[in-house]
């Protein structure tokens, strides 16, 4: 009985430590990219447990005759791949606003405020120094008032660089 108990404790301990991973308590940095023009987001991540975190991004976008801002919140699940590599998935949403200025016809200028639902999937590398680099894909489904914007689905791809503390 004693041997069985020690064996069970050993197996349980091994199972718990083999799934353990280290995600930093906090990380702040930039998320660079977009699907329709170069944009940047100030990105903050806060660990809730060893495998879950919240990410909040405040971004601005600009393109030809286009500018706007967006606030995004995501809940993420983080899974180890190999060594310092992790992959993650998440879900969330946010809101934003944009303006479009037509350079040829001012009557075609418009603006919109919108809300959106978002998914997130990505891969990240945790360096030995307090640096985290990631590449993610974030599909977003937007809901707004603009009659000019028929494409409410956006595929956002970005590179993230964050300082961990």
Image: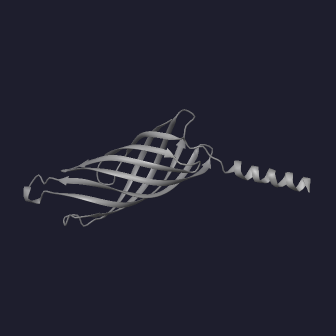
Q: Which residue is drawn at 82% across and 55% down?
A: 8
Q: Position of residue 59 (x, y in %)?
A: 32, 47
Give above or below for 133 relative to 19.
above
User: What's the coloring here?
Assistant: one colour
Q: Which residue is drawn at 19% across and 53% down?
A: 99
Q: Which residue is drawn at 31% across and 60% down?
A: 115
Give above or below for 44 relative to 116.
above
Residue 105 appears anywhere in the view: no
Taking depth in this image into account, of 85 and 45 the one nearest to the observer is 45
4 lies left or right of 106: right
Taking depth in this image into account, of 128 and 116 the one nearest to the observer is 116
Q: Position of residue 74 (x, y in %)?
A: 44, 54
63 lies left or right of 6: left
Q: Position of residue 66 (x, y in %)?
A: 21, 51
Q: Position of residue 147 (x, y in %)?
A: 19, 67
Q: How many marks?
A: 0
In what quadrant of the picture does the N terminus appear?
bottom right
Residue 14 appears anywhere in the view: yes
Figure quadrant of residue 100: bottom left
Q: Which residue is drawn at 19% across and 64% down?
A: 148
């Amino acid at each position: 009985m004693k041997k069985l108990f020690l064996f069970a404790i050993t197996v349980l301990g091994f199972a718990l430590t083999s799934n353990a991973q280290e995600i930093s308590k906090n990380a702040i940095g930039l998320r660079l990219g977009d699907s329709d023009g170069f944009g940047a987001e100030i990105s903050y991540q806060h660990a809730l447990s060893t495998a879950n975190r919240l990410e909040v991004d405040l971004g601005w976008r600009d393109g030809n005759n286009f500018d706007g801002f967006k606030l995004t919140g995501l809940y993420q699940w983080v899974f180890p791949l190999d060594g310092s590599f992790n992959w993650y998935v998440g879900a969330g949403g946010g809101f934003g606003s944009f303006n479009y200025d037509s350079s040829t016809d001012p009557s075609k200028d418009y603006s919109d405020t919108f809300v959106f639902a978002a998914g997130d999937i990505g891969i990240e590398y945790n360096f030995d120094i307090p640096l985290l680099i990631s590449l993610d894909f974030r599909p977003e489904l937007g809901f707004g008032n603009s009659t000019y914007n028929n494409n409410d689905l956006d595929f956002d791809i970005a590179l993230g660089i964050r300082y961990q503390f």
